[in-house]
Image: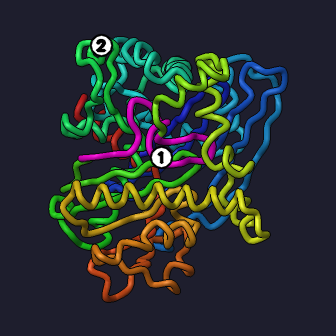
């Protein structure tokens, strides 16, 4: 077993998990936490310890205990000290469970990083430089990396990039049809995101079915507040819905997804909206929230059931976009063997799953309504009918475990 600390850092918070990873890639969570309100007058943290069954018994966490901390946290280094203090006071002891590597989630790796990479000073500089492509995400990741390298200076740190899995996109899928020299100068292309989740789910599907990953054509829907869908051929991403940024593609909780670019020009000219105002509109006040006034799919269903026409339209628009992408990716793959749903909505919302695939009977996709309704988030569930030519699964994602796996591989190769 190898202990890995996984860190997902933002500008004013970071999440962490301490994982015990077995040689076969399975793992169990020893602890998790959230440090937030960094740089604000009143900082806060939560530290959850998982207590596991004894050896020889099921390795699922039997119980958990959460501890809360409130104190000023002026910066990320102070936040890491809060985390270290929580481990020392509440366990598990890092002296008894020393991490062999720290894995960092980094949203944007640009075209430079196509796999998990051991962090050196130069790699850190490159991640910071890529902040121009991900100004909301990479700067926070860099702050977390710097704080973590100060706190854990004697062990390797590895960056795992959301974009890396999509480096296999063919040029025809990655290229926008704008002036080529301008695009090259400003690094404008389709990068794709949620790659860690798409990679984890696609490989888990192959293992679950006892199939060779290289033989499978898959469509994976990662549906959370942020949402994307990827066409995966033989374990390689060949098309994905997000592009230069996580804004392109599906309708999301607060993001618009695909939009005629002239809409922005029209709003700029006619409504006098600035670049910052347009950015705020498309990322924070659009999607399901913009259409229905709520971003959470559970709230949307409650409003639909109450007869709210705006909520019904928002659901219809959301599902319509899912179907459009499913059909497009069927064409790109030349057919599909497995369709999977993952993340918060994908794992928990039977209505969305059914709606997304309702019209795909022509492609051999048939959902079993009872299986779909009974699927639970904690385990892989088949929701396709017995006579369905395409297997349809609900697969719980585990991005932290995937980051831990990749971090272990990268650090061992580097050594």
Which numbered circle lies on residue 179?
A: none
Q: Earlier in the sequence, mark 2 or mark 1?
A: 2
Q: Residue at x 19, y 39 (%)?
A: 170
Say which quarter of the image contains residue 172: top left
Residue 215 visible, this angle? yes
- Can you give x and y, in whole percent of width and height, for residue 202 in the image? 32, 58
Numbered range of the magenta stretch: 238-258
Q: Is residue 253 magenta?
A: yes
In the rendered image, the residue lying farthest to the front is 270
In front: label 2 or label 1: 2
Q: Does 52 appear above or below 226? A: below
Give the x, y percent position of residue 267: 60, 25
Label annotation for residue 182: 2
Cβ atoms under marks 2 and 1 closer than 8 Å: no
Q: Secondary structure at mark 2?
A: helix
- Front in this rendered view, residue 123 or 405: 123
Q: Report how many numbered discs are placed on residues in the image.
A: 2
Q: Which mark is residue 400?
A: 1
Above-or-below relation of 163 to 109 = below
Residue 196 forms part of the magenta stretch = no
**Residue 32 seen anywhere in this rendered image of the structure:** no
- Alpha carbon distance from label 2 to label 1: 37 Å
Q: Tell me if mark 1 has few (under 14), some (14-19) or many (20+) residues whose alpha carbon lies within 10 angstroms of its own.
A: many
Task: Please name the residue shown 40% across and 57% down the image.
Answer: 324
Q: Quadrant of the C terminus?
A: top left
Q: Secondary structure at mark 1?
A: helix
Say which of 41 and 55 sits in front: 41
Place of residue 335 in the rendered image (x, y in percent of width and height, measured from the top left): 22, 65
Is 299 on the left-hand or right-hand side of 223? Answer: right
């Amino acid at each position: 077993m190898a202990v890995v600390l996984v860190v997902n850092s933002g500008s004013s918070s970071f999440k962490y998990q301490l994982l015990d990873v077995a040689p076969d890639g399975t793992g169990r969570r020893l602890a998790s936490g959230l440090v937030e309100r960094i740089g604000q007058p009143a900082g806060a943290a939560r530290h959850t310890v998982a207590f596991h069954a004894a050896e020889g018994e099921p390795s699922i966490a039997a119980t958990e205990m959460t501890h809360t901390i409130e104190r000023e946290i002026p910066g990320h280094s102070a936040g890491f000290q809060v985390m270290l203090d929580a481990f020392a006071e509440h366990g598990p002891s890092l002296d008894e469970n020393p991490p062999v590597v720290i894995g960092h989630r980094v949203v944007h790796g640009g075209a430079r990083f196509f796999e998990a990479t051991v962090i050196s000073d130069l790699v850190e500089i490159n991640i910071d430089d890529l902040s121009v492509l991900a100004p909301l995400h990479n700067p926070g990741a860099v702050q977390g990396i710097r704080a973590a390298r100060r706190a854990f200076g004697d062990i390797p740190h590895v960056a795992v990039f959301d974009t890396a899995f999509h480096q296999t996109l063919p040029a025809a899928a990655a290229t926008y049809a704008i002036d080529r020299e301008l695009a090259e100068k400003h690094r404008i292309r389709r990068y794709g995101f949620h790659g860690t989740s798409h990679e984890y789910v696609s490989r888990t599907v192959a293992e679950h079915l006892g199939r060779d990953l290289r033989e499978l054509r898959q469509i994976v829907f990662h549906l959370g507040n942020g949402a994307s869908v990827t066409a995966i051929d033989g374990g390689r991403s060949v098309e994905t819905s997000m592009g230069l940024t996580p804004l392109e593609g599906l309708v999301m909780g607060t993001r618009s997804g695909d939009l005629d670019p002239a809409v922005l020009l029209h709003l700029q000219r006619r409504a006098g909206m600035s670049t910052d105002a347009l950015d705020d509109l498309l990322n924070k006040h659009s999607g399901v929230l913009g259409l229905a006034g709520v971003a959470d799919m559970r709230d949307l269903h409650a409003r639909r059931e109450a007869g709210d026409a705006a909520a019904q339209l928002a659901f219809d628009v959301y599902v319509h976009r899912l179907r459009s992408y499913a059909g497009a990716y069927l064409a790109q793959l030349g057919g599909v063997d497995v369709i999977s749903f993952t993340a918060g909505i994908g794992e928990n919302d039977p209505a969305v799953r059914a709606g997304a695939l309702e019209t795909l009977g022509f492609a051999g996709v048939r959902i079993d309504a009872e299986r779909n309704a009974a699927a639970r988030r904690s385990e892989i569930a088949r929701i396709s009918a017995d006579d369905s030519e395409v297997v349809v699964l609900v697969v719980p994602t585990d991005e932290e475990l995937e980051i831990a796996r990749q971090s272990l591989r990268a650090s061992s190769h580097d050594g």
